[in-house]
Amino acid sequence: MLFYTVLLLPFISIAITSIAFIRFKYIQEIDKREVVKGEEINYTLSINNEDFFLYPYIKINFCNSDTIFVNQFDSKCFSLLPFKKKTFSYKLCCKYRGNFSVGVKSIEFEDYLGIVKFVHQPISIKNITVHPRLVKLDSLKLKTDYLSESHALSNNRLENTMTFSDIRKYIYGDSMKKIHWKLSSKMNELLVKNFEGSSQTSSAILLDIKKNSHSFEQNSVIEDMLIEASIAVIYYCLSNWIPINLVYYNNKGFNDIEAKNPLEFQEIFNILSGVKFENDMNIKDVLNIYVKNNILKRTSILLFTSNLDYELYEEIYKTKLMGYNLSLVYAFPDCIANNVSSEVNDILNELLEIGVMVYKIKTENDIKGVLEHR
C-alpha cells in the first residue's frame, strides 16, 4: 500500500494542480486609464478558489514591477484554502511619462510536490497613459523678433489682404484695420490678423530624442525633463500667439510640426506625450538639417538636449554666425550630475560668450524657475 501510495501521489498532485489551474478565476480593476505624471492610480486584484481542495502554491508576477512601479509591485506567493478569495490592493504612483502595462504579467501554479509548474499569461493586458506635467510659465526671455506692421513696411513683400494666415497679439504700430474685433472681444485682448505675405518669424523647438545609455530610471528622468520643458515653452508661445515649429527626428524620419495659435496646442501635447527616445541621430545633425531646409527663414531656435559636446558647439556656432537667435535648454538631473564632465561646463560658458542663452535644468522642479529666467 505504501508503494502504491508513493507511486500514485505524483500523478494525483499533478492532476489536482491541473484542475486548479483550469478552474481558478481572478479579477483585475483599475480606477483610471489616463493620468498626469505624479498622480496615483488604485489597482485591485482578486483571485478565487471555488474548489474543495487547497491551491498549494501560487505566484503572481506583475507588469513593470522593475521599471515604473519599482518597489510598488512585488511578486506575491501564497496558498489558497478551499472556497476562499484573496484580494490585493495597491496605490500606485505614476512617476514617469509614457504608456505602460499595469496588472498581472503571469500567474504560476506549482503542484504539492514541486514537480511541475503551470504558467498562465493574460490574454489582454490593462494599459495606462501617463501624460507629462504642463508647467505654465509667467514669462520667458525669448528673442522672437515678431515684427509689428510698422517694422514690416521696410519689407518689400506684398500682403494678400483677401486672406489672412493666422492671428497674433497686437503690437504697437499695427494698423487698427487689422484688429480681429470679434475674436478680440472673446479672448479679452487685442488680436491682429496676419495676412498672407506679412513679415513675421517664428520659434523653432528642436528636441533631442536620442536614446541614452543610462539606466531606465535615469533615462526616464532626463526624457521627462526635456519633454516638460519643451511643452512649457510651446504652451507659453502659443498662448501668446507666437507661431512655433516642433522639430525632431525619430524612426519615421524628420518631423517638422507647425502650430500658430492656442487651439493647436493639444495636438502638440498629445504628440509629445507619446514620443519615444529611440533614435541614434545626434541633435547637431537635426540642427544642420533644419537650418538647410529653412535657409531663407529667420527663426528663433530653442534647442532641448541632454547631450552636449564640441561637435554640437561648432554647429551652434555656425548657426549663430548665419544670423539665427539661438537658445539652449540643457538637462542634467541630479542622477547623472556626477557624470557631467568639465568639458560640458566649458562649452556652456563658451556658448554664453558667443551670445547663446543657456538654461540649465537640474531637477524637474527647476523647470518653471529656470525657464522664467528670474
Image (cartoon, rainbow, N blue to C red):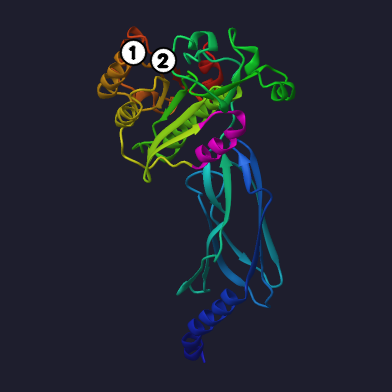
Q: Nearer the viewer, residue 225 or 289?
A: 289
Q: Nearer the viewer, residue 192 or 86?
A: 192
**Spot occupied by residue 131 in the image (x, y as percentages of width and height):** 57, 39
Mark 2 sits on what residue?
358
**Spot occupied by residue 252 in the image (x, y as percentages of width and height):** 38, 46
- Earlier sequence position, callout 2 versus callout 1: 1
Q: Is residue 70 above or below residue 158?
A: below
Q: Secondary structure at mark 1?
A: helix
Magenta-span inclusion, residue 81: no
Q: Is residue 26 left or right of residue 151?
A: right
Q: Which mark is residue 111?
A: none
In this picture, which residue range is highlighted in magenta? 259-274
Q: Secondary structure at mark 2?
A: strand
Q: Nearer the viewer, residue 158 or 346?
A: 158
Q: Is residue 125 above or below residue 157?
A: below
Circle 1: is it few (<14), some (14-19), or many (20+) Cα within 10 Å? many
Residue 180 seen in this snapshot: yes
Identity of the amino acid at label 1?
Answer: Leu
Q: Is residue 353 left or right of residue 134?
A: left
Q: Is residue 249 left or right of residue 112?
A: left
Mark 1 sits on what residue?
351
Q: Are marks 2 and 1 in contact (CB under 8 Å)?
A: yes
